[in-house]
Image (cartoon, helix red, strand yellow):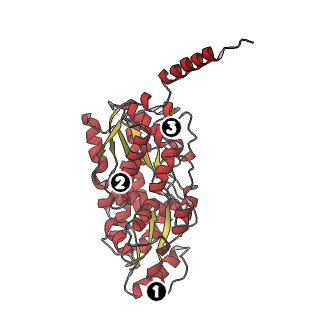
Amino acid sequence: MIRLNPRKKFAALAILAMTVALTPCTGSAQSKPSGTLSFSNWQWLTPDTGPAMWDAITSGYRASNPKAEFKQRSTAFSSYIDKLNTELGAGTAPDVFVVSDAHFATLAAAGLVAPLNKVTEKIKLNNSNDFLKIKGQQFGVTWEAPSYALVGNKNVMAKAGITSMPTTVVELIAAGKKIKAVGDHGFAVRHLISEGGGWYTDFCAWTYANGGSWSDGKKLTIDSAANIKGVTEFAKVMSSGIVPIGDNASTFRSKFMQNKVGFIIENAGAVLSFTASGKLKGKDIETAPLPFSYPGQNQQLILAVNAKSPNKQLAEDFISWILSADGQKVLRGQRQASTLATDVPLSESFSADNPWAAQYIKNGKTARSTVIDGFGSQTAAISQVILEAVERVITKGEDPRKALEEAQAQASKL
C-alpha cells in the first residue's frame, strides 16, 4: 500500500478539491439554460388564485434556475384558444402554454407541440398522461385534471331544511324546489351556446354518467340510448323551474358564493376559487358523487411546449422542474383538489380545512377525458354539433332522440 506523507497528502487533497470545483455539475445552476420564457395560460387572470399561482410557480422554478426569467401571456378563457391558434400560425406563440385536452389533440395532430420524451422518460407519470403519448412520443403532460362533482352550498341547504346531498336527478329537482321556495335558485348549470367550450366539458357529466360516450373509438355514437337519456334528464332539470335561465358561468358562480344558489355540478378548480375569494369557507361547501349511475368526466388541462419555440432548451428544463417532486408540490399547493401529472398528495392542513376536496380526488381516479375517442382533432367541431342539438331540445322542445340522430348524421359528415 502506498502511503503519502502529510505534506503530499494535503497537496493531493487540494488538487482533488480544485478539480471537483472546476468540474461542471449536471443539473447545477451553472449548467442551466438562460433566457426569458413566455408562458400562456388563461388561469393567470383568475381572481384570487391566478396571481398567487403565477408567483409560486415562477419563483419556485427560479430558485432552481436563477438564470431564467418569465414573461406572462394571458387571455380570457372565451378567446384564449382563438388567440393561441392565431399566434401559432403567425410564429408569435408563447414558449410554453396550457391548453384543454380537446384543443391539445388538434395542435398535436398539426405538429405544433414539441415532443417531451427527454424530459419525461425518468418521471413516473400517472395514467392521466397516457393519451398525451402519440406513436410512442410524449407530446404534453397533465397540468391539472379537475374532475366534476355535485357541489352543495351548505348555507343555502340549511336555509331550506335540506340535510343531505341529492343522489339522483329526481332528488336534485325536489331539493331545488325546496330552495326555490325560500327565495333562492335550486341548481345552476352552463346552458348557453356562447359558452360552447365550457358548456361541452360540463355537459359531458350528463351523458358519461348515464353510461354514454360520443364514440366507440372507431365510429360516432352520438345518438346512443345512454346519451339520449342524459339529454332527456338535462332537459327535465332545465324545465323544472329551479335553474336561473340565461345566467352564464360567471354569473351563477357569483350567486353560489353569495349564498343564492343551492347546487351546481362543477369542477374542482372552480370550487377552489370559491374558497380562495374568501366569500365561502371550505366547510361551507359539501360535495358528493354526480347524481347519476356512472363516473363522469374531467376537464383536463395540458402543459405543452411550442414546437417552434426559440427557447426550447429552457422550456424543457422548466417542464422537467414542474414534474419534479419540488415542482409538483408547488403546483399541488395552487391547484389542490385536481389530479396532477404525478400522484402528489394533498396536504393534511388543506384537507382538514376543505373536506370537499376528498370527493374530487376520489372522482379523479375514474373520470374520463372529454376528448372524443378516435376523433381527437375533430372534438371541437363535433362538440359544437352536439351542443346545437342540445340547445334545440332545451329552447325549442325538440325530441332528444330526434335531435341526437340529426347530430349523429351531421357530425358523421365531418
Residue 142 seen in this snapshot? yes
Secondary structure, mark 3, is strand
Secondary structure, mark 1, is loop
Q: Which mark is residue 43?
A: 2
Q: Residues within 10 Å of mark 2 (few under 14, many from 20)?
A: some
Q: Residue at x 54, y 73 (%)?
A: 168
Give whichever of 19, 141 is nearer the camera. 19
Image depth: mark 2 or mark 1 in front: 2
Estimate the spatial distance between the alpha carbons at disc 3 and disc 2, rounded to whole Å: 25 Å
Q: Which mark is residue 389?
A: none
* Label pair 2/1, CB-CB below 8 angstroms: no
* Label pair 3/2, CB-CB below 8 angstroms: no
Please give the residue where the numbered disc 1 appears in the rendered image.
160
Give whichever of 403, 50 is nearer the camera. 50
- The x and y percentages for residue 348 are 57, 61
Residue 414 seen in this snapshot? no
- The x and y percentages for residue 92 are 26, 36
Residue type, numbered disc 3: Lys
Secondary structure, mark 2, is helix
Q: Residues within 10 Å of mark 1 (few under 14, many from 20)?
A: many
Residue type, numbered disc 1: Ala
Q: Which mark is residue 133?
A: 3
Earlier-in-chain disc, 3 versus 2? 2
Estimate the spatial distance between the alpha carbons at disc 2 and disc 1, rounded to whole Å: 34 Å
